[in-house]
């Protein structure tokens, strides 16, 4: 009689279950099922209710992971929301309109938003908060500065992948173009940007922020006809946010100085972390 090798013992069910749950991409099921099973046993929950709880947890977690993924894909320079936005600091801004926009229905209507106002009045903050709200409600978002977008378009053109980038930009539900107007565009840059706005017209929403009133946009695009055609498309279905007032940063640094009445030479000159501008007590 030859001794046969001992049969391999079957894998414990936990190992198989973990494998299947990974295959099915149910990480929350996997993480929580033992704890929930113990809870269900203690509370006398039946199997269906136990499964229901697990499925609900997985759904909540999945939604959170998707929002995080959308936020990463949007490439926001910072994540800001209206929770930290002080509407009383900018009375020219139509708060009910902003709160309405934060509900994201304009994205379904494919309306645009243009935020105009001088520097430091919260235009970037407001468009970041609208971008975040869109991510939270399930819309894909892309954030660019106007100069950054033009740079990417020119680079894509030089590398013969302009059509691909244009298709990506046309497909995104919300395109945010911040800081139009700080840098005048080259003729090619202006034409490439025009093409993007044109391709998105009535297909998806675009938010543009600018420090310049519409009358001065020609100075950015360097061409009256192109500017006219662009404004025509952009303002066809548009909500305009006016942020005119004192710079929030300036106001804050003045308030800081009021709280710290030491003579100017005792107050160390500090650089504004965003602008690099030296803040001195006056
Ligand atoms: P803009 O884009 O109009 O130049 P920002 O949005 O960059 O201005 O605002 C400058 C700084 O001040 C940012 O840190 C921003 O978060 C803050 N800020 C501006 N307005 C407000 C506001 N009304 N409430 C809270 N923070 C604000
Ligand atoms: Mg800004």
Image (cartoon, rainbow, N blue to C red):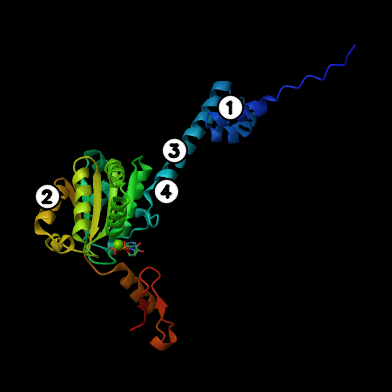
Q: Is residue 2 left or right of residue 241?
A: right
Please tell me which residue lies in front, 40 or 264: 264
Q: Residues within 10 Å of mark 2 (few under 14, many from 20)?
A: few
Judged from the image, the secondary structure of the residue bearing numbered disc 4 is helix
Q: Residue furthest right?
A: 1
Does mark 2's beta carbon lie closer than 8 Å to ligand 2?
Answer: no
Of residues 97 and 26, the one nearer the viewer is 26
The answer to whether residue 84 of the structure is visible from this angle is yes
Relative to 45, is 74 on the left or the right?
Answer: left
Residue 252: % across, % down: 35, 71
Specify which label sits upstream in the sequence, 3 or 4. Answer: 3
Please name whichever residue, 225 or 84, is drawn nearer the observer in this view of the structure.
225
Residue under numbered circle 4: 72
Confirm or deny contact between disc 1 and disc 2 (CB under 8 A): no
Q: Position of residue 88 (x, y in %)?
A: 28, 62
* Numbered label attached to residue 221: none
Looking at the image, is mark 4 or mark 1 earlier in the sequence? 1
Element type where label 3 sits in the image: helix
Label 1 crowd (10 A; few <14 / some 14-19 / many >=20):
few
- Which quarter of the figure has residue 154? bottom left
Residue under the point 22% across and 52% down: 192
Instruction: Determine the image quadrant of residue 181.
Output: bottom left
Cα distance in 3D space between marks 1 and 3: 21 Å
**Separation of marks 4 and 1 at Cα, in angstroms:** 29 Å
Residue visible at 50% across and 33% down? 58
What numbered label is drawn on residue 232? Answer: 2
Q: Compared with residue 24, is residue 135 higher up or lower down, i.e. above or below? A: below
Residue at numbered disc 1: 20
């Amino acid at each position: 009689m030859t001794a046969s090798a001992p049969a391999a013992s079957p894998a414990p069910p936990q190992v198989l279950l973990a494998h299947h749950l990974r295959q099915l991409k149910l990480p929350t099921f996997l993480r929580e099922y033992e704890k929930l099973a113990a809870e269900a046993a203690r509370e006398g929950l039946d199997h269906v209710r136990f499964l229901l709880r697990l499925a609900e947890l997985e759904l909540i977690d999945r939604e959170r992971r998707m929002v995080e993924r959308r936020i990463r894909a949007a490439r926001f320079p910072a994540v800001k929301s209206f929770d930290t936005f002080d509407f009383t600091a900018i009375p020219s801004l139509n708060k009910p309109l902003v709160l309405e926009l934060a509900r994201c229905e304009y994205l379904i209507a494919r309306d645009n938003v243009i935020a105009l106002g001088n520097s430091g009045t919260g235009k970037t903050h407001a468009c970041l908060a609208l971008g975040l709200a869109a991510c939270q409600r399930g819309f894909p978002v892309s954030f660019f500065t106007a100069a950054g977008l033009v740079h990417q378009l020119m680079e894509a053109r030089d590398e013969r992948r302009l059509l691909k980038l244009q298709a990506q930009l046309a497909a995104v539900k919300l395109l945010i173009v911040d800081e139009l107007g700080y840098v005048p565009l080259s003729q090619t840059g202006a034409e490439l940007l025009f093409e993007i706005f044109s391709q998105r017209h009535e297909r998806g929403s675009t938010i543009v922020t600018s420090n310049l009133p519409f009358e001065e946009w020609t100075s950015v695009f360097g061409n009256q006809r192109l500017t006219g055609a662009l404004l025509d498309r952009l303002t066809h279905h548009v909500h305009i946010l006016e942020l005119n007032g004192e710079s929030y940063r300036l106001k804050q640094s003045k308030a800081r100085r009021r709280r710290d009445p030491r003579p100017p030479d005792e107050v160390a000159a500090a650089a504004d972390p965003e602008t690099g501008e030296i803040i001195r007590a006056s």
